[in-house]
Amino acid sequence: MAVNFIVGVAALFQYAAAVLALRVLRITGKDPAWMLIATVAFLMAVRRSIVLYRSLSHDVVHPADLAAECVALAISVLMLMGVARIGPFFLSVLKSKEELRKRSYDLGERVKELNCLYEIASLIEQPDISLEQVVQGTVDLIPPAWRYPEITCARIILEGQVFATANFEETPWKLDRDIVVRGLRVGALEVCYREKRSENDEGVFLKEQRHLINAIAGRLGRTIERVWAEEDREALQEQLHQAHKMEAVGQLAAGVAHDFSNLLTVIRGHADRAGTMLAGENRARKELEQIQEATHQAADLTRALLTFSRKLPAEKKPIDLCAVVQESERLLRRVLPAAVQLEVDAACESPLWVNADQTQVHQVVLNLAINARDAMPDGGTLRVALSSMVESDIGDLPEAPDSGGSAARLVVADTGVGMSPEVQTRIFEPFYTTKTRGQGTGLGLSIVHGIVKDHGGHIEVRAEVGKGTTFTVVLPCIRSGAVAEPVRSATITPKGRGELILLAEDNQHVRGIIASTLESLGYNVTLAEDGITALGIFAQHDKEIRLLILDADLPARSGPDCLRELRDKGVKTPAIVITGNVDFESSELDDETVLLRKPFGMPELASTVSVALGTDAGQEMRS
């Protein structure tokens, strides 16, 4: 009985080992080695079954050996234990292989994503590549980096421009991110699947893909910001270059104006002298009056040149705005092409008096007209209208000027291309322009705005794209009673009584006309061409010289330097400093000195000399 029990248990263990071997086959697959092991275990179980059957049937020919069966039982137990222990090992190996396969797949996906970012970075770093090329190249690099590249499409919308893959179509399976530059949304990046794919806990798109689109959108934002910063830097360099050119023009204008003032002084002086030599109704007198009028206009032109170069401050005085606008019409017709029709309506019933710098008012009208001209490249109509405003109309303005009850309204309207509301909000910013590079500095309208505000006025713009632009300038009027009577040209009436005058002037023509005029008036004049000579002459005749006339810009020693040296020595002799230098201020002079600016006429010279020799000193005389 003991032998039969051992044989039966051994058979059960063998069958159990065979079953476990078959289960391992499910894990390892149809591996030949494990198929052989399972077969051996099954055959050994069959053999144990045969032995058990013979033992139970009392087969005396093949009696069961107790020792052999005990060994067989031990082998069966060990086999069962081995197969039972090796199964989980192979299961863990299988799981490891599956995990490795999954990780390898994920690694491949991450490599695709990294390659995408690397290629985008390489694209950005290419020299001489435009922002549009960068954006389009980025769009084309996105689909291969996605999980299902064959059904992936992408699109970038940047400030109204669309960059998309050739197969792009908007679908419900979309992943998008904003493109942000300097805290502002400037566009969006969209990635779509053209077909539906199985969803997971994160949806159709994996979290790694969400990280990738975030990285691409962020990189695009930084790239755009860098490009814009570079464009801003180039714009600033262009503005600096333009400012340097403007400074050079200003210096040239100041130099030209200085020399021009000397010439005008000579011309006006000789015209004045010639006028005093003509008797009665001589026909030549009218010709001389034309010369004098031309020199006055030339002086105004010089002043305009200096104002343009910012070398001369605004000189506000009562002016009739109607007359100024009417006077601007001739200049406007020179700057407008034939295709632009000019309409000027400045025929006021009564003068519109404003306290303003006439040259700067001309500049306002001219700059607005030029801006309108550029807005009508194919021609159109420019209308300039001037009218008065009552107090009720002034109060409706957003920034009503302090007009004391009345104001003048200047309207400059064109039929050009107009402008958008966004442009209107920035139109008066310095260096802001909608014109292409090289066609505008962005300074014209900012200068207009500055002039209007400096005159206590208000300017506004109204425009509509395709329907033209209207600028309205409102300036406060002054009462007619506050307008001084026009100063009439002085006549050469003050006479001298032989007083000795020291004249130091390096320009021989200016020196000559001043000397001859003073001598004709009864003064004695001694001449010097530079500061050192002037000081030497004064040292010899200091008790006799009654008046010093010194040019501010003398060679060797300037006129003011000569005066300072004399004043330090206690010399109280009155002096007149004449200059065409706009940077020279009367505050640099003492109370015994009068400043006379070029160009001046001989009546102004005679009057100034009379004042300097009299009691009125420390003032500035202007022609």
Image (cartoon, rainbow, N blue to C red):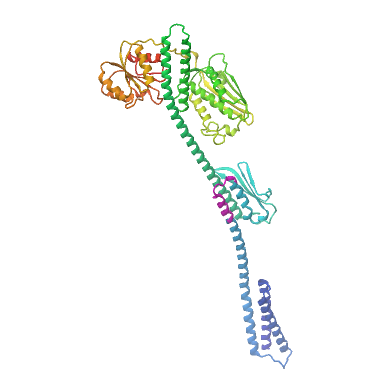
Magenta region, residue range: 115-132
- Can you tell which quarter of the image residue 132 is in? top right
The single residue placed furthest to the bottom in the displayed view is 61
Q: Would you say 256 lies left or right of 97 here? A: left
**Front-most of 214 and 133?**
133
What type of secondary structure mainly makes up the magenta span?
A: helix
Q: Quadrant of residue 181?
A: top right
Residue 390 image point, x, y percent = 56, 18
User: Quick check: is 116 in the magenta stretch?
Assistant: yes
Measuring 51% from the left and 30% from the top, which residue is drawn there? 446
Relative horizontal placement of residue 180, taking residue 148 as reference (left or right): left
Q: Residue 80 appears at what percent x and percent y? A: 64, 79
Q: Is residue 598 visible?
A: yes
Q: Is residue 398 visible?
A: no
On-image quarter of the C terminus: top left
Please state, as top left, top right, bottom left or bottom right, where the N terminus lies in the image.
bottom right
Vertical relation: 320 (above or below) 398: above
x and y percentages locating residue 307 in the rendered image = 46, 25
Residue at 54% x, 35% y is 438
